Amino acid sequence: MKKKHAKSKVEYPFATIAFYGPDNKHASKVVVGIITDEKSEPEPLERWVSGQIDVRRNPKIGEEIKSFLDAHHVKRVIVADGIIGCPHEEGEDYPMGTKCPFCSFWLNRNRFTHKIEDED
């Protein structure tokens, strides 16, 4: 007999946390978004950047994130598994539709598997 997995009820608001870096070892940026209902985009959305210290090990940033989550009465947090891409933002740091000129590690690399993919 096949087991049915119970679908867990989504509790709002929940937060998403994603880490970004120049490669898949050093997270220089963390982005935290608050989802308030099933139809909303992450809003508010906050970003923290750290130069030398990996954001995952920066106690000041950790405390600020905790305060941010507490202030928005977050019931659940979903954290990305590892670093999921370049810290630079398309349209902000480099032109839309182009590849980041600053992070050669991510060039033609899948941001979730970190494996190089063929160019289309």
Image (cartoon, grey):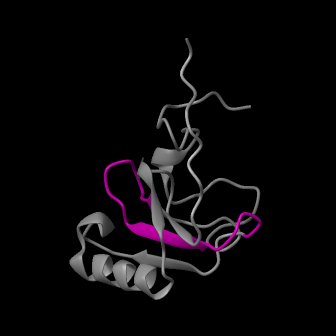
Q: Is residue 112 above or below residue 60?
A: above
Identify the residue at horizontal 49%, vertical 31% (top origin): 115
- The image quadrant that residue 4 belongs to is top right
Residue 116 at x, y percent in the picture: 52, 31
Regarding residue 62, the answer to whether it shows in the image is yes
Residue 93 drawn in magenta? no
Q: Is residue 58 left or right of residue 85?
A: left
Q: Is residue 41 above or below residue 64?
A: above
Image quadrant occupied by the N terminus: top right
Residue 111 at x, y percent in the picture: 53, 44
Image quadrant occupied by the C terminus: top right
Q: Is residue 118 left or right of residue 111?
A: right
Q: Is residue 72 left or right of residue 28?
A: right
Identify the residue at horizontal 32%, vertical 79% (top origin): 61
Q: Is residue 17 above or below residue 23?
A: below
Along the line of sight, the residue nearer the viewer: 100 or 21: 21
Identify the residue at horizontal 50%, vertical 71% (top origin): 32
Q: Tell me the magenta residue range.
A: 19-40
